[in-house]
Image (spheres, grey):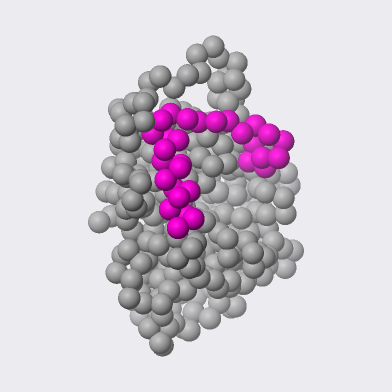
């Protein structure tokens, strides 16, 4: 089943769970109230375009073709131009369309020459997944950027990232998205295989770097994730959306929902009486199918020393369509997840 079809039903995803945990009001404004963001963050658009170029690169390899570095640059430029046309992108200080175009090409050059592309057998690219958990009546959905298999039959689930600095081992080992991906891999045909997880990270330093980070998860990690997901669903289904406007919340400073957030705080009626009182299933106000296949993310900021961006699972198909048709991307999608 295509990811766009999975998104037509109530669901959660790694990024939507992260949004809810980071700021319940951010989740509500974008995914429940379906309010449009004021702008798109340059980091999100940039990372998405890098991803699309890498997906094209690996798909050609699966077809027995070899893309040159120049062709990889051309793919990125096409996607980047399509993303910039007709959109309100907010650029960080010192950044603009041209500087990020050059940065993207430099990062992809590094990837082209540093990544061991023929090390493992490619199983799939942008493979959608869904699974269910006890205590959460909606599906968990997403897409694996890349799935590989080594000579011993071990499955390697890969997530592409762009980042402002290197990851620490603890960050990789505790990353919730990777935990969810291993759970998804086990539930989608790989339960009898050893599974490894890997970040392929393009690091946006003065001299671009490429690093790979391997990790895996245990049953204890899965239990912790299941409990977290269950509590997130409990909060959503009961209409509990707590704002996090703390100065410690790095996403708050450059959030694309700041105007809506201020209006919410200044408003008189901020209750959640339109929700269904925690029956576990959303009413028509809490969820409806989206017109766009784009994963929501309301922040343009970056955590300290981090320009990290994972290409969110729901964005792939729509962004590719936009780039090919040279149309601007639509707004982020209203959804439960």
Q: Position of residue 6 (x, y in %)?
A: 29, 49
Q: Nearer the viewer, residue 72 or 289?
A: 289
Q: Nearer the viewer, residue 304 or 108?
A: 304
Q: Position of residue 106 (x, y in %)?
A: 63, 66
Q: Nearer the viewer, residue 223 or 236?
A: 223
Residue ID at (38%, 34%): 237
- Location of residue 120 by image quarter: bottom left
Q: Residue furthest top?
A: 268
Q: Position of residue 32 (x, y in %)?
A: 42, 31
Residue ID at (28%, 42%): 9
Q: Is residue 248 above or below residue 43?
A: above
Image quarter (top left, top right, bottom left or bottom right) of the C terminus: top left
User: Is 17 placed left or right of 64 in the picture?
Assistant: right
User: Is 323 placed left or right of 280 in the picture?
Assistant: right
User: Is 102 placed left or right of 230 in the picture?
Assistant: right
Q: Is residue 114 above or below residue 273?
A: below
Q: Residue furthest left?
A: 1
Magenta span includes 140: no
Magenta span includes 240: yes
Residue ID at (40%, 87%): 152
- Location of residue 125 by image quarter: bottom left
Residue ID at (50%, 31%): 241
Which residues lie in the magenta part?
223-252
Q: Is residue 55 above or below residue 289?
A: below
Image quarter (top left, top right, bottom left or bottom right) of the N terminus: bottom left
Q: Position of residue 100 (x, y in %)?
A: 63, 54
Residue 6 seen from this side: yes
Residue 82 seen from this side: no
């Amino acid at each position: 089943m295509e990811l766009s079809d999975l998104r037509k039903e109530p669901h959660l995803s790694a990024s939507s769970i992260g949004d809810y945990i980071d700021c319940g009001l951010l989740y509500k404004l974008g995914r429940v109230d379906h309010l449009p963001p004021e702008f798109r963050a340059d980091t999100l658009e940039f990372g998405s375009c890098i991803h699309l170029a890498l997906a094209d690169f690996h798909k050609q390899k699966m077809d027995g073709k070899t893309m040159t570095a120049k062709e990889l640059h051309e793919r990125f430029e096409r996607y980047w131009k399509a993303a910039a046309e007709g959109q309100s992108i907010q650029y960080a200080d010192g950044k603009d369309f041209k500087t990020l175009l050059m940065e993207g090409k430099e990062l992809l050059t590094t990837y082209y020459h540093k990544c061991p592309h023929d090390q493992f057998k490619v199983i799939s690219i942008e493979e959608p997944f869904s699974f269910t958990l006890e205590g959460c009546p909606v599906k968990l959905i997403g897409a694996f950027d890349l799935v590989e298999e080594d000579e011993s039959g071990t499955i390697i689930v890969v997530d592409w990232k762009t980042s402002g600095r290197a990851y620490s081992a603890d960050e990789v080992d505790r990353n919730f998205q990777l935990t969810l991906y291993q759970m998804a891999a086990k539930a989608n045909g790989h339960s009898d295989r050893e599974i490894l997880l890997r970040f392929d990270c393009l690091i946006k330093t003065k001299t671009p770097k490429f690093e790979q980070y391997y990790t895996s998860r245990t049953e204890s990690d899965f239990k912790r994730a299941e409990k977290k997901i269950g509590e997130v669903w409990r909060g959503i289904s009961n209409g509990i959306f707590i704002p996090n406007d703390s100065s410690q919340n790095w996403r708050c400073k450059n959030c694309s929902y700041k105007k809506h957030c201020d209006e919410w705080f200044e408003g008189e009626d901020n209750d959640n009486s339109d929700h269904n009182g925690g029956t576990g299933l959303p009413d028509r106000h809490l969820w409806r199918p989206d017109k766009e296949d784009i994963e929501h993310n309301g922040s343009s900021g970056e955590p300290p020393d981090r320009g990290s961006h994972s290409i969110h699972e729901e964005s792939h198909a729509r962004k590719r369509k936009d780039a090919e048709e040279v149309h601007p991307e639509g707004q982020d999608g209203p959804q439960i997840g």
